[in-house]
Image (cartoon, coloured by chain):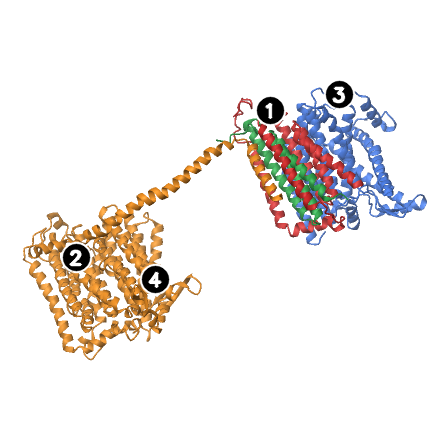
Chain colours: A blue, B green, C orange, D red
Amino acid sequence: MIFDLIATSAKLLVFLGVFLGAITPLMVWVERRFSALIQDRPGPNRLGPLGLLQPVADVLKFMFKEDVTPTSADRFLYLLAPVLAVLPALTTFVFIPFGPTVEVAGRQVALVVSGADAGVLLLLAIASLGVYSLVLAGYASNNKYTLLGGIRASAQLISYELAMTLAVVAVLLPVGSFHLGDVVAYQQAHAWNVLLQPLGFFLFLIAMFAETNRLPFDLPEAESELVGGFHTEYSAMRFAAFFMSEYIAMTTLSALAATLYFGGWDLFGYTERIATALAGVVGAEWFWMGAVGMAVLTTKAMAFMLLFVWVRWTFPRFRYDQLMRLGWKVLLPLALANTVLVAILILSGVL
Amino acid sequence: MVPVTWYLLLAALLFTIGTAGALTRRNGITIFLSIELMLNSVNLTLVAYSRLLEDQTGQIVVFFVLAVAAAEAAVGLALFIAVYRHRRTIDLNRINLLRW
Amino acid sequence: MTQYLWLIPLLPFLGVVVNAVLGPRAPKGLTTAVGVGFPGLSLVVALGALWQYATQLHPAAVEQVIYTWVGGETSIRVAFLLDPLSAVMLFVVTFVGFWIHVYSVGYMGPEADHYSYQRYFVYLNLFMTSMLLLVLGNNFLVMFVGWEGVGLCSYLLIGYYYDQDVPAQAGRKAFIVNRIGDFAFLVGMFALFAKFGSLDYSAVFGAISDNPALVTGDYAFGLSFASFVTLCFFIGATGKSAQIPLYVWLPDAMAGPTPVSALIHAATMVTAGVYMVVRTNVLYQLAPGVSLLVAGVGAATALLAATIGIAQNDIKKVLAYSTVSQLGYMFLAAGLGAYSAAIFHLGTHAFFKALLFLGSGAVIHAMSGEQDMRSMGGLRKWMPVTAWTFGIAALSISGIPFFAGFFSKDEILAAAATQGHWVLWAVGLFTAGLTAFYMFRAVFMTFGGQFRGTEEQKHHLHEAPAVMTLPLVVLAVGAVGAGWVGISKVLTPGHDWNWIHHWLEPVIAQVGGEAAHGGEGAAEAAHHLSLGVEWSLIAVAIVTAVVGILVARSFYGAGRGLVAGEDVLAGRLGGFYRVLSHKYWVDEIYGKLVIKPLAALSRGFFKVVDGWIIDGFLHTAAFLAELGGDLGRFTTTGNARNYVLYFFVGIVILLGWIVF
Amino acid sequence: MLETAVFVVFALLAVGSALVVVLHRNPVYSTMSLVVTLVAIAALFVMLGAPFIASLQVLIYTGAIVVLFLFVVMLLNIGREEASQRGLPQKVAAGLGSLALLGFLAAAYLRLYGGAAQAPLSEDFVSMRTLALELFTDYLLTFELVGLLLLVAVIAATVLAGKPKDPPEPDGKRPEEVA
């Protein structure tokens, strides 16, 4: 009981530390530098080496800015929205494993925060709650741009959730379990799902962009049309909350993508070997297992982040109707076809 | 170990609240929400029973209830939109042409 | 071909369907082709089947089950039966029917607009179908279906000119009068079914022949079962075959087109009653009382109709009453147990009576619609074929030797005489004389002497087209030859050329010792009368006929200077003529005694039962409903929440009731 | 003990938010609190050994259906429902009826399962595998039918909410004047 509590909280801390403490700020930096690179300009390079401390400055800036609440806004909901934004973002990654089951002080410990039976399902479920923050923010601000942004957000997120969920289902079919750990194990045994289900991966990728309101799907916050979209009225930490939650969501989804399609923490079986090797030098095996696994996972996730940024600064924005048409008339049928295809392959013994 | 009866009672309470809302409110959406509430209390009852009888059939029924609820929500809301287009209101006291 | 038996009724029905589907827009030629072609095919099939059947050494009855109507051990099947009796009927119906179809093309062609032309053939084909069902059915139910079918067609065709009042009325009369008979028929059928649990001829008659006691026991109203059933059937027969008291519809039925009168009201349908009686002869043989009644009614009808016939001036009416009287003959025969004779006469009659009608049709055609013989005359000059064929038919019906009618009529009289029913014999004889008289009255009035019609009628006079004369000739041949299949033994000492008699023997098997008479019995008895007596009887019959003809000639013969619109007979008979020409006022009497009271009764029912009681209930109910609505509508506020509330309260109450 | 506490917490959460759903005049608040209720009930599902149903509840209900509600609320921009004394008898009858219903149900339950002791959760009962097996064998037809129903619903919704060929000119009247 107590041990489990400790273990769980430890794993939680690791995740929070890595994702919140390291990746998200890093991402902000990467986004700026990379975009600068693409646009052939230096980008932030003063603060710290290569401007690495820029995120810190940003955070400070957010902290000390004035926190404005529109008078006509619906105060309660206005305050609630950012919180709702952060919560799902922070909770979803607990289902993502960052290592195999290891032995700690004679106990078996799975290197995943939550071993819930319905793993991925719950992940998707909680992620789907993210939409409320946007909608509420849009509504509570009592501003036509924000409202439009909110409406767009709700429509968009629901539409692309379908494609995404179906893609995930297609992955889970051959695995036969909702545990992402089993998904990783399956890929260890066979091959990365990106090879087994390229179409599924493609769908998931697109849906991922849409779910995180990233270009080319950032219509809820299309500055050229809706000023700032749903968070037009927000400022200071509240805005930061939206800002962060977006990046956290990105990281989580990237990690999820890596886990579903790129073997997660596994590196063609080298993860364990490296870990044992290191354990041979110093420290406990379970520690290294976790560390290396996390490293591999984050590396893969980072790759996705770069993709995010790259795409953002490369592609133009969709028109709203195009977005809807793509979601309902292209992705959804494709996702269904993909699922059926996978099912057939399984029945025919190929997968 | 919480006795299942509590769940049942809770469900009954929620159902009652839902009914009261559906019967008293005038805003179509709110009434709809109350109905959803009733549906959920029923779900809770079903799951509680499946727990009590150690039979997963109850859960399966809930599964179907969810699907049906989705369909019902889609059609119902579409209806509200259609009504709103014509009457510029979804206040049930104002949508009362169905009478002698 | 016997295996194609089912095709025989089906083909005309196809004609019905095709013509009905093609509708009046189809070209006239096509309608004709279909309407005549299918009965033609049916005739071909029938002849084929008959040939194969007749040429067998020992013809075994062919039964063919189409499908099972009512399952179970008391099964009723739609099945066809080809045995000697139905064979004869089949031949008559298909053969005469076909030629009358041919004739119709010429007769209906000019006068009918295309719609009614097509309608006519649909009806006529439908009649063929029903009639064939009637004669071919192997059980009483199928027979009844045909029975009702022909009734319907008869109604439709009598009321063919439905836009005129008289035909419509006549049609209704025929239909309603027939209902009475049909009702009795039904009762008889139910009785049979109740007793034997089957309606198949084979089953019923088989059971009876095995154990006659089964039906001779007392059954109801002091009648034996056999008597009861046969009585019912006979009442049915009187309806269909126009016997006293239900003959009144047939004369009126002449309102239909003449070919219809020929086919339905002379040759085939009206003989259905006779067919039925003969078909059930097994029962009749066991019900001597009823048989005697049949004979009596037959004789009476024959006499009555003949007497009326002599005073009719409408050529078709004459033929109609002659038909009634001839049918009387058949029943007389059947009643006397000379079933083969009855069928024999039925066959010959079908030929010469159809021929007569068709001839009259040709005449009416030539006279452009005129039917009153008093304004005809001398038509022989213009339409020889018609005249000759008509004459042949007349000779045949009058019973002049070597013509068909002679042999069949002689059989009947012989049957009467041999059984010592001298009264019946006398009546038959007298009727024969009357027949000869009125037939030749018609012949002379129509074809002899000078033309008494108007000038422009005279101008129009013409021989009928070939399509009409051909059937006349064909039937004329039949009217002569049809008799030769049944030459009485008496005429050919030492030989027995009475083919029809032996042909029918299997159907008219002897039942029970108590039923002494029967076709066979008649022949047996004939030998008990000395040959001399036999010959003298025949001679007497011939003389009677000749006398009748001569009398007719003396009244209406050439150079008697007949005047249009007058009947010399009127002067001679005086008051009695009026009685006859008014048909003994039978219709009026019926009107007074039956129709008036019935109408009054129904009017009463309409007023009291329908108007007060039934409508009262209805109105009360309606009022209550309205009241409820008036009160209840206040609950429909139009506010959905209120409705839900009612619903909810109901649920709560129910729940409370369940829980506590 | 802990379980009881958890139950009480979620139960209170559910009831409280349900009351908000029914009582709050602003449909947005009602919708949001419905979300809370649904999540709380989902948690109760987990406690009852139905994790699958629980996640479905969150995924479908809160994730899709209620979002749809919110979407419509915003689309139609429905304001607060103004208080009115109309239909007071309706309110009274509804209240009494509801209370009666609650009473009946409570009585029935207590009478039936007052002292019913249930067995501890069995692994097999909780497992999704058995559930899925049952769902796709015994209830396959029902499953398919529900799918069909959803399809029909989608079509119906698009037809109903879709823009009419010639949009009826919204009469300038204010809702008060209509009807």
Q: Secondary structure at mark 3?
A: loop
Label 1, on which residue? D84
Callout 1: residue from which chain? D
Q: Quadrant of residue A152?
A: top right
- For badge 2, the amino acid type reads Val
The answer to whether residue C497 of the structure is visible from this angle is no
The answer to whether residue C620 of the structure is visible from this angle is yes
Callout 4: residue from which chain? C
Callout 2: residue from which chain? C
Callouts 1 and 4 close, C-beta under 8 Å: no
In the image, are marks 4 and 3 on the same chain? no
Label 3, on which residue? A68
Q: Position of residue C228 (x, y in %)?
A: 30, 64
Label 2, on which residue? C318
- For badge 4, the amino acid type reads Met
**What is the distance, in whole Å, between disc 3 and disc 1 at their CAs?**
36 Å
Q: Quadrant of residue D39?
A: top right
* A208 in relation to C51, above or below: above
Mark toward the viewer: 2 or 4? 4
**What is the distance, in whole Å, between disc 3 and disc 2 at their CAs?**
120 Å
Q: Nearer the viewer, residue C101 or C607?
A: C607
**What is the distance, in whole Å, between disc 2 and disc 4 at their CAs?**
35 Å
Q: Position of residue C505 (x, y in %)?
A: 28, 73
Q: Nearer the viewer, residue C225 or A149?
A: C225
Label 4, on which residue? C189
Q: Secondary structure at mark 4?
A: helix
**What is the distance, in whole Å, between disc 4 and disc 3 at their CAs?**
103 Å
Which residue is at 23% across, 49% downward?
C596
